[in-house]
Amino acid sequence: MSKVVTFGEIMLRLAPQGFLRFSQASNFDVVYGGGESNVAVSLANYGVDVDFVTRLPKNDIGECAMMEMRKRGVGVDKIVWGGDRLGIYFLETGAVSRGSKVVYDRAHSAIAEIESGMIDWDAVFDGVEWFHWTGITPAISQGAADVCLEAVKAASEKGITISTDLNYRAKLWKYCDEAHREKVMTELTAYCDIILGNEEDAHMHFNIHPEGLDVHKHGHDVKAEAFLSVCKQMMEKFPKAKKVITTLRGSISASHNTWAGVLYDGSKMYETRQYQITDIVDRVGGGDSFMGGLIYGLLKYPEDDQNALDFAVAASCLKHTIKGDANLATVAEVEKLMGGDASGRVAR
């Protein structure tokens, strides 16, 4: 199967145990994760040859982040070293009607201070057929945005398939105004063959929104047809795109979500079944697990978009049962759920 490269920031995640609030915590669980590193772990777990590229501080915490990737089978030899600190985020896990909270502490992280020329993209992309980035990376700093642009240009010149998860993050994008954010994201996304994003991503980055629907008022009653207009508008804006994909999350409560997906190839819209995800263990990384499953599905089933999309949704559904940022479900477990077995029986 093709070799994949992902590029972005990996962070130290600190979370109170269980459903404790920050003010109740006397200790924190430690996890390492981030949008692009989570995708890399998913792919490695499915047996795909994948490298994760980032910039890490040369200290014990940076080494721990690197070792976490290596432990999961992700290639780490293209990581560059420098800077003073690893980015941190604090997670308070919500339940029922209380949503989860994230507090970022990632200013002046190693990758926030990355600069053009620090990564040899020609060497990184040797033998690579797929490159993935997310909208989180250019939101970190102008330097990170510039290096991301270097990457997509280099990948495009080599004919590498480029994918993105638009991933709008309101608490980031502090270094520029709205107009500059749209300019940055438009230039980067124009190089992409595969675009994943929900209605908020499309609206906040490109002022594109579903026609005739306010998703906040419709709550958990999310219909795939409402997002066909978003997919069409995205393809009109980005003619290089071959597929536009949207996840459909209905939030009944912090503990109960519905989950499905839509893929539009320019002529046909594919839709998955809707999963009921009750008693969520950890929803952080849900979109990343979808993207990892989608890349795997499109590589394994290159002529079967429906099967690829079904794999992505089932993989992400299983991620909601796994503590931590990354999806550790196996291909066999995903295919079992795809086949309709959601019994959760003990495997003996």
Image (spheres, rainbow, N blue to C red):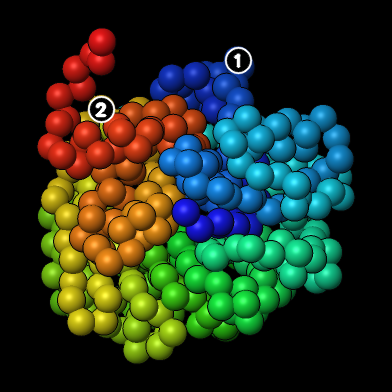
The dot on residue 279 is: 2
The dot on residue 95 is: none
Disc 2 residue crowd, few under 14, some 14–19, many 20+, Cα 10 Å: some
Image coordinates of residue 242 in percent, x first then y, are 36, 78
Q: Secondary structure at mark 2?
A: loop
Using residue 51 as the reference point, say whether residue 292 is left or right of it: left
Q: Residue at x 86, y 40 (%)?
A: 58
Disc 1 residue crowd, few under 14, some 14–19, many 20+, Cα 10 Å: few
Q: Nearer the viewer, residue 146 or 19?
A: 146
Q: Nearer the viewer, residue 140 or 336?
A: 336
Q: Secondary structure at mark 1?
A: loop
Q: Residue at x 57, y 33 (%)?
A: 72
Q: Residue at x 62, y 77 (%)?
A: 158
Image coordinates of residue 160 in percent, x first then y, are 55, 72
Label whose residue precedes the other's in the sequence (1 or 2): 1
The dot on residue 26 is: 1
Whether residue 294 is visible = no
